[in-house]
Amino acid sequence: MNQFVTLRDIVLLSLYALTSILSLIGNAFVFRISLRRHNHMWFQSTTNFPFTRSCIFLLNLAIADTLLGLTIPVEFVFCSKYFVQNITASSYVCAGNKSMQTLAYNVSTLTICLIAYDRYRLIENPLEKYYPKKPFPVILLTWIFSGLFAATCFVSTKVNIYFNSYEKLICSQILYPLRTKYFFNDTIYKIRSLCLILLFYIIPLLIITSLCLLTIRIISRRTVIGVREFQTFKQSRTRSISLLMITIIVFTLSHSPIHFIYLRDIFHSSSKVSLGRSIQITKCQDSTMYLLFYWLSISGCCYNSIIYSWFNRKYQNLVYKCCRVIVCCERCNACSN
């Protein structure tokens, strides 16, 4: 049994690390290509700001996913058993990293809703792209709203504690960083979990599903005149519908399991809490289901921006060009050496 737990933890740690690496690489491509297109369009555009509304939303999604990818390896250090037991302010540091992870996760979720609405708006009225509204106030609101919710991690939050022993490398615990009689109970954690499920899962899922289905309905009913134009339009329509269906499926599969776990915790969590020198925690739990679903929920940071960008042919061509440039540079360096 101990060998199975150790093997499971090694696999999970590898998945977490791989998710972080792929997130940084994938979103780096998004940044590079977006800035490259920005520099190219800057000299061709007569406007002061050539970034489109959709591009800004994709960049915001990439920023949130990059931040989420960065918090994963940081969590290995600041939420390790040694750090938690030996550092005085360990509860605040670990909860702070968790709050950054929650902030990035929630911003990513809300940005997907904004992208779904933006695509629906452009499909319904294509002329609106020539009269773009400034997206920055909406983006700022998503960060502020997500930040306010993430701040509750300092009251109570569920985190993964790493490297507990040679047999058990990962377990999950509920932290209560604030040592007050008002917050030292299960009620705050349950309220927080319920708000998380409602505000960042159920409502976004309904919004994304509704907007994507409405967009698919509009696209499927459109047609064009001419054989050549129809073939091009048919390919574009198939690509757009595939993107929208993948958006719904991926969001549902990646977000649903962990929120069902949170819902279960609301009704079955225990109020038995042990006091430590610098941290208040519940008993260590090593549920394979929770650890796997937790990875599934944060894995979106490594493929969100790629999914939204990959169905754009211009983006594909720029990715191929970047890869060719990198390969050519490596070959030139090898030849010079």
Image (cartoon, rainbow, N blue to C red):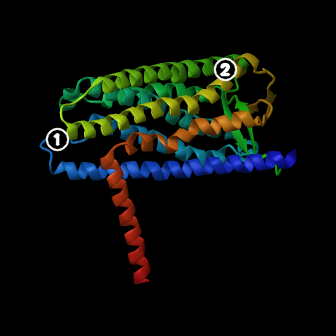
Q: Residue at x 41, y 31 (%)?
A: 244
* Circle number at residue 138: none
Type of residue at label 1? Asn
Q: Residue at x 27, y 23 (%)?
A: 124
Q: Is residue 9 left or right of residue 308?
A: right
Q: Residue 318, position in %: x, y?
A: 32, 54
User: Which residue lies under the disc numbered 1?
Assistant: 48
Q: In the image shown, does 65 or 232 lie closer to the viewer? A: 232
- Vertically, is 176 above or below 43? above
Where's the C terminus, which quadrant?
bottom left
Q: Residue at x 21, y 27 (%)?
A: 128
User: Which residue lies under the disc numbered 2?
Assistant: 263
Residue extending furthest right? Answer: 1
Q: Which is nearer the N-term, disc 1 or disc 2?
A: 1
Residue extending furthest left? Answer: 46
Q: Are marks 1 and 2 in contact (CB under 8 Å)?
A: no
- Vertically, is 11 above or below 161? below
Type of residue at label 2? Leu
Q: Is residue 312 left or right of residue 228?
A: right
